Image (cartoon, grey):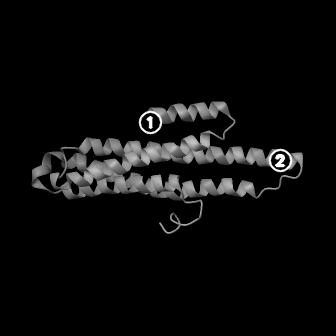
Amino acid sequence: LDMLSSDEPAPGGGSASALMGAQGAGLASMVCALTVGKKKYLEHEELCRKVQQKTLALKNRMVELIDRDTQAFNEVTAVFAMPRETEEEKAARKEAMQAALKTCTVTPYEIMETALEALHEVDAIVGKSNQSAASDLGVAALNLKGSLQGAWLNVCINLAGITDQGFAEDYRAKGEKLL
C-alpha cells in the first residue's frame, strides 16, 4: 500500500484490482467460516464448506496476481531502457514492447476471470449463509465487482497499444463477455 501511494508506476490499478479481488474472496471465505457448524445453517453446510475452500483458493490466486501484474508492468518499463539507435534496435524494442503489452493484457484478464469465478461462489451462498454476516457477503461482492471492472480498465488501456489486431479483438470480446 505504501508503494501504491508513492510515485512508483507499479503497483498500479491492475494490482489494486487484484487486491480488491483478494479481499472479496477472503470475505466470502470468512462468511462461510461463520456459517459452518451453525445448527441454523446445517442444510447448507456442505455448500458452504465447498465455497469456503474455493474462495480461499481464489483469494490466494488473487494475491499471486497482485505481484504478477506489477511484474508485467515492469516488463514495459524495461523496454524503455532498451537502445534505439539502429533500425535493428528499434525493431527489437518495438517487438519487446508488443510482447510486454500482451503480458500486461493477459494478467488483468486473469484477474477478471478470477473475480467472476469468486462472484459466482458468492452468489451460490446468498441466503444460505450466516445472515449476521450478510453485510460482509455484500462487501465481498462489491470488492469482486470492483476487481472485475478495474481489471477491465487495465485490459483496455493495454489493448490500445497492441498492433496485433487479432489478439486485441479476442481479448476485447472475451473481456466484454466477462463483464
Mark number displayed over residue 178? 1
- Is 141 positioned to the left or the right of 106 in the image? left
Which residue, given by chain and number where applicable, does mark 2 sit on?
90
| 23 lies above or below 103 | below
> Label 1 neighbourhood size at 10 Å, few (<14), some (14-19), many (20+)?
some
Q: Amino acid at mark 1?
A: Leu
Q: Amino acid at mark 2?
A: Lys
Screen quadrant of the C terminus: top left
- Is 112 positioned to the left or the right of 140 in the image? right
Query: SS for tag 2?
Result: helix
- Is 65 positioned to the left or the right of 48 in the image? right
Q: What residue sits 16% from the left and 55% below the top?
A: 132
| 16 lies above or below 5 | above
Mark number displayed over residue 59? none
Identify the residue at the far bottom of this view.
Answer: 2
Q: What residue sits 50% from the left and 69% below the top?
A: 2
Residue 74 seen anywhere in this rendered image of the structure:
yes
Identify the residue at the far right of this view.
Answer: 86
Residue 46: give x, y in percent of width and height: 22, 47
Query: SS for tag 1?
Result: helix
Residue 93: give x, y in percent of width and height: 78, 49
The number of discs equals 2
Residue 75: give x, y in percent of width and height: 66, 55
> Label 2 neighbourhood size at 10 Å, few (<14), some (14-19), many (20+)?
some
Q: Is the residue under label 2 in contact with that under label 1 (CB below 8 Å)?
A: no
Foreground mark, 1 or 2?
2
Residue 66: give x, y in percent of width and height: 50, 57
Mark nearer the N terminus (1 vs 2): 2
Q: What residue sits 52% from the left and 31% below the top?
A: 173
Q: What residue sits 64% from the left and 57% below the top?
A: 74
Q: CA distance from mark 1 to mark 2?
A: 36 Å
